[in-house]
Amino acid sequence: MGKSIIDRSPIPARIAPSLFKFILSVAPSLHDLELFDDTLALSLRSLLLRPMGQLELFDDDGTRLSDANKFDYVAQRVSESLVGSREGQLRALKSGFDECGLSEALTHFSCTDLMLLMCGDE
């Protein structure tokens, strides 16, 4: 992937925005999850829209969800779904940018900019 930047040769593939966000150290969003698992995203979005006083839900640690902590819970679930199970592979991929000497330069890019640079506009 780093070579595509160095060679200015876009990768002819669609790559999930959450991958580029990981490379840029940006937290994935609920919208990113919709592209990956729309059922889970819809469920989490529904949770955000409901007053928690009507529900008795608990997170994995046994903490009761409230209106004050439900946004943190959703962010955690999004991250677990998009990063958690493949974090080792994502870190290895990200380290390739360090080896190419690109990590510092990438700090100036947004997720969209990096997607366009690496994959073109197709």
Image (cartoon, rainbow, N blue to C red):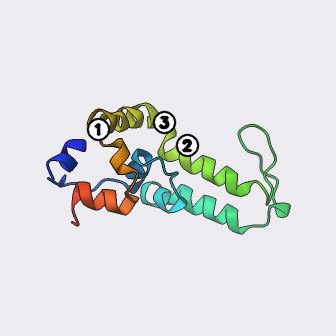
Mark 3, residue position: 85
Mark 1 vs mark 2: which is more N-terminal?
A: 2
Label 3 to label 2, Cα distance in Å?
7 Å
Labels 3 and 2 touching (C-beta < 8 A): yes
Camera-nearest residue between 12 and 110:
110
Residue 54 got which mark? Answer: none
Label 1 to label 3, Cα distance in Å?
27 Å
Q: Nearer the viewer, mark 1 or mark 3?
A: 1
Q: Residue at x 18, y 46 (%)?
A: 6
Question: Where 68 falls versus 80 (above or below)?
Answer: below
Element under disc 3: helix
Residue 101 got which mark? Answer: 1
Labels 1 and 2 touching (C-beta < 8 A): no
Q: Does residue 119 appear in the picture of this structure?
A: yes
Camera-nearest residue between 40 and 25:
25
Q: Residue at x 48, y 36 (%)?
A: 85
Which amino acid type is marked by label 1? Answer: Gly
**Left or right of 23, for residue 61:** right
Mark 1 vs mark 3: which is more N-terminal?
A: 3
